[in-house]
Image (tube, coloured by chain):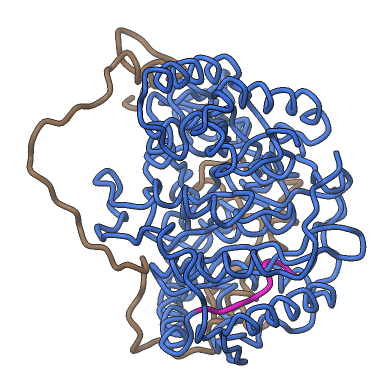
Amino acid sequence: MKRLSRIGLKGGEKMDKGYIEYICSLAKLEYDEENSDRIIEKIKAFDVYAEKLADIDTNDIKPLVNVNETINVMREDAVMPSLERNIILENAPEKLYGCIKVSKIIE
Amino acid sequence: MNLYDLTLHEVHEKILEKEISAKDLLDSVFDRIDKVEDKVNSFITITKEKAHEAANKIDKKIAQGETIGSLMGIPMAVKDNICTKDVKTTCGSKMLENFIPPYNAEAYERLENAGAIMIGKTNMDELGMGSSTENSYYKVTRNPWNLDMVSGGSSGGSAAAVAAGEAFYALGTDTGGSIRQPASFCGIVGMKPSYGAVSRYGAVAYASSLEQVGVLTKDVYDCAIILNYLYGHDPKDSTSLNIVHDNFIEGLKKDIKGLKIGIPKEYYGTGIDDEVKNSIKTALKAFESLGAHIEETGLAYSEYSLPVYYIIALSEASSNFARLDGIRYGYNANDYKDLDDMYTKSRSQGLGEEVKNRILLGTHSLIDKNYKTHYDKAIRVRRLIKEDFDKSFQKYDLLVIPAYPTAAFEIGGKIKDEAAMYMGDLCTVPVNVAGVPAMTVPCGYNSKGLPIGMQLVGKHMGEATILRAAYAYENNASYTKLKPKL
């Protein structure tokens, strides 16, 4: 674990329960204190794995997000067939007045 | 001989000759399902009524003299992460237990339009995350060759259904080996197409830049038939390539004299079972006897494929699965304080442990302070891996590697040998990182009678060469082909 500093955790930061709580909040997943040691171990193992890539100098290598290096696909700005509202709503857990119902987001 | 034991092209001949109807085929397959499904657990949903309605329509069309296409009236199965209109598509997850797509995935739609009869949706590891189908929310699929063994994964239900005679072929998806490894475990053919060759529209995305929809079949000829329907541009998928593909049947029977086959040494190291090595060695002799040249080679960046694959796959998963928020569709926790709490509770209750862990690792790879060392680094090394494959294909027409280091492992057993586990990933994931096509072809059995598979890997859009070589091998293999005894 001594090389961890090279791959993310900088001086003063720790891979601790607080960090797990933080990434859980980003991923919108419940933080489970009991489970957090296990997650810490998983992340540490993953980082050791990722560390392997530091062996390769990639300064002059361009990123490859998609093997076909696709570009933006454009089409005419024309109305195309789409699904009916009532069909879309069939899968929504909560609906009201022909809309998908969500909780209040403005206080 | 039972109808369900035949291949797609064999039953097609019988339909052409009017020896049998679509209904006869369906009856045979559903009889088989009644007998073996309780043991194998291939399906999450069986669509018997819809299948009968569809078969009736096909039989009427045939009676009216309509031209009979290769897929018309023939029962098939679809992995449960491929959207099927009005039929539940759960992805093996509690999160999507009641999700009924209002549209078909393009890959399935093409087959349905050609008269394919879907008989059900197959079991899988939750959202494609796993390699044994033990990670499904619903059930564990068992290997038709030995019910104590896994069927592989994540397309384990599709592989088991085809091997058990419950379907003539099945659609699957392959993000990091999810078609090729279960095909190997179940002794059938499995094709992961070139990235961009088959539309991903309506296939529930796990790692968008790695995965493709593909097919699991009883033999190579059947695979070629289906690829002819699946391949081709789809304007609904921006990653779908707009290029003309070969007719895969036409080239199938050409010889393979002079074909150059590379054997990358990195894929035959410690961890690969001796019985697997020996089966492939025998297969290579068959290729040689057919006029192919075999040569040892290397893929220098192979070992880096694994971290690259995991970082990319989990980063894309953490982003893709943000859509599983319990609002527009999917599981919704009833008891919550506010919107944030609703997201968190719905996702935490609806998703399984493995999926949540992988989302967290993906989130960890993408956060600002790790981005450079993780995701950004991985996509740069990805270019080197792709170039490594490109270079290799300047010299060789095909690469041959094991489909998996071992035959199927025990249910609940996991692989204890770390080297074998490492090689398991190494055999399958580099192909997805490089976006090249690869096919699992059965090449023998181990001492326990379990199937062994090899992979033929081709250059991007080089499927025709893979199929030609696989077909030549299949017809000249020295081992005796068996069927699972169920």
Say which of A2 and B373 sits in front.
B373
Residue at 77% of width from left, 78% of height from top? B277
Say which of B367 and B325 sits in front.
B325
Q: Residue B417: x and y, percent?
A: 85, 70
Letter of the brown chain: A
Q: Residue B94: x and y, percent?
A: 62, 30
Q: Reply yes or no: does residue B325 show up in magenta.
A: no
Q: Residue B468: x and y, percent?
A: 50, 68
Q: Residue A60: x and y, percent?
A: 33, 89
SS assignment for the magenta stretch, majority: strand
Letter of the blue chain: B
Residue at 67% of width from left, 59% of height from top? B181
Q: Is residue B445 above or below residue B203?
A: below
Q: Is residue A23 above or below residue B142?
A: below
Q: Is residue B179 left or right of residue B453?
A: left
Residue at 53% of width from left, 53% of height from top? B223
Q: Quadrant of residue B387?
A: bottom left
Is any part of residue B134 visible from this angle? yes
